[in-house]
Image: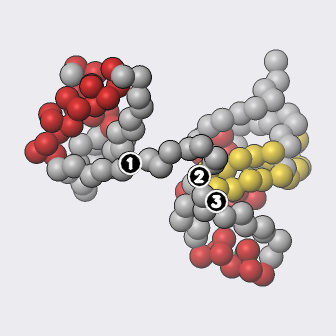
């Protein structure tokens, strides 16, 4: 069976990954991909490379992307308003000392059928940064 839609990370651009008829690639956080990697997303048949249409998204465009929007054929769409009927999202930063209080509040919030996002700066442990990882946060939140 051939996939008609593929969602993944930069792992999809490895040499061993081949697409049969990729017509559109949606790239989020395009700054995480190298120039060559973005150009090579497409269909490889033998030694030939066929290019597909690309929709690149980024909240923080890299300088090369900004230059391409000015000098090359790269269009920009700016989303500067919420969809109709969408309520604004409340974002809060809370110190680690209040973590248990926040978790208690989240339990109350979620029991009402509401949603919450817990943002972590790291997925896995880092030697350079002493921050709680997504893995540790997941374990703590599932035990609460």
Q: Earlier in the sequence, mark 3 or mark 1?
A: 3
Residue that label 3 marks: 79
Residue that label 1 marks: 90
Residue at image x 59%, y 76%?
63
Residue furthest toward the bottom?
71
Cα separation, mark 2 vs mark 3, equals 8 Å
Cα separation, mark 1 vs mark 2, equals 13 Å
Circle 2 or circle 3, nearest the eye? 2
Residue at image x 75%, y 58%?
39
Looking at the image, residue 134 sits to the left or right of residue 68; the answer is left
- Out of 141 and 101, give the one closest to the viewer: 101
Residue at image x 78%, y 81%?
71
- Out of 125 and 86, give the one closest to the viewer: 86
Quadrant containing the N terminus is top right
Residue 78 picture location, percent across and down: 66, 64
Query: Can residue 33 be spotted in the picture?
Result: no
Binning the other alpha carbons within 10 Å of mark 1 as few (below 14), some (14 to 19) or many (20 upward) gives few
Quadrant containing the C terminus is top left
Binning the other alpha carbons within 10 Å of mark 3 as few (below 14), some (14 to 19) or many (20 upward) gives few
Label pair 1/2, CB-CB below 8 angstroms: no
Q: Earlier in the sequence, mark 1 or mark 2?
A: 2
Rendered view: 68 above or below 39? below
Circle 3 or circle 1, nearest the eye? 1
Could you tell me which secondary element the residue under label 3 belongs to? loop
Residue that label 2 marks: 82
Cα separation, mark 3 vs mark 1, equals 18 Å
Looking at the image, residue 140 sits to the left or right of residue 28; the answer is left
Label pair 3/1, CB-CB below 8 angstroms: no
For residue 142, the mark is none
Residue 43 picture location, percent across and down: 84, 43
């Amino acid at each position: 069976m051939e996939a008609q839609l593929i969602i993944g990370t930069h792992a999809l651009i490895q040499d061993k990954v081949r697409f049969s008829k990729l017509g559109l690639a949606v790239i989020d956080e395009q700054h995480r991909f190298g120039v060559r990697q973005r150009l090579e997303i497409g269909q490889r048949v033998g030694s030939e490379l066929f290019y597909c249409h690309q929709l690149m998204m980024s909240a923080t465009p890299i300088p090369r992307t900004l230059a391409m929007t000015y000098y090359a054929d790269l269009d920009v769409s700016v989303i500067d308003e919420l969809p109709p009927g969408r309520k604004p999202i409340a974002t809060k930063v809370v110190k680690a000392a209040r973590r248990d209080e926040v978790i208690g509040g989240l339990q109350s919030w979620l029991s009402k059928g509401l949603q919450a996002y817990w943002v972590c700066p790291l997925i896995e442990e880092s030697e350079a940064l002493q921050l709680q990882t997504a893995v540790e946060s997941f374990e703590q939140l599932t035990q609460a």
